[in-house]
Image (cartoon, helix red, strand yellow):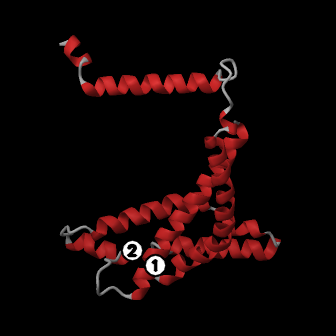
Amino acid sequence: MIIQSWRSPIVIYFLVTQLLVLVVALLDIHGNIFGLVPWRYTCWGHLLTVVEQLGSHLRVASCLLLPAIQLVVGISHPSWISLPFFIESCIGLVDWSLTSNFLGLFRLWKALQFYVGFSIVMLYVYQLPIEFSSMLQWIADFVGLFKICSTSKWIEICSFVSLVLFYIMVCTSFITMGLILFKDFS
């Protein structure tokens, strides 16, 4: 039985993958000993530089557009779900006006990233063709969940699109910051 479990293709694929990862890691660590060119000077290094430059442009664009999109999420479909976006927009605008520091608009974006992800999941689950009890239906209507269909109002569609766009842009800005930090540490 033990011998047969080693012949399973899944186990073999897993072991081959682990060995390849080990070889790549050792070559990356000790590449200079074998006369290999560091990865920074290869096509992957150049690709990372291009992604970093593109990422900096995306980060600047998102820094300019994200406060506006956040405000659209907060005011497009007034509900309990959109209230945190509106409150955070107000806090950021007050901080910006008092300190004349543009960075005040970016407060609590990490917390909002988790909240917007949770909101998108709730909206997605609400779209599923499931019969909800009258109590769950009342709670969903109370907090501001809505179904997207052909008869949806443009306000609901605008709210949903801005919610998804806000999530994508916040994630993109965090990913580009992570790539820059990764390049700085390597």
Quadrant containing the C terminus is top right
Residue at image mark 1:
159
Residue 21 position in % (x across, y down): 49, 27
Residue 107 in view: no
Classify mark 2: helix, strand or loop: helix
Q: Is residue 14 above or below residue 107?
A: above
Which one is closest to the eye, mark 2 or mark 1?
1
Residue 91: give x, y in percent of width and height.
Answer: 67, 72
- Callout 1: few (<14), some (14-19), or many (20+) C-alpha neighbours within 10 Å? many
Determine the residue positioned at 51% across, 70% down. 165
* Quadrant position of residue 140: bottom left
Q: Residue at x 65, y 23 (%)?
A: 31
Is the N terminus in the top left, top right, bottom left or bottom right quadrant?
A: top left
Q: Amino acid at mark 1?
A: Ser
Q: Earlier in the sequence, mark 2 or mark 1?
A: 2
47 on left or right of 74: right
Helix, strand or loop at label 1? It is helix
Q: At label 2, which amino acid type do we have?
A: Val
The residue wearing badge 2 is 143
Examine the rendered structure and indicate whether residue 161 appears above or below residue 114.
below
* Residue closest to the eye, 123 or 13: 13
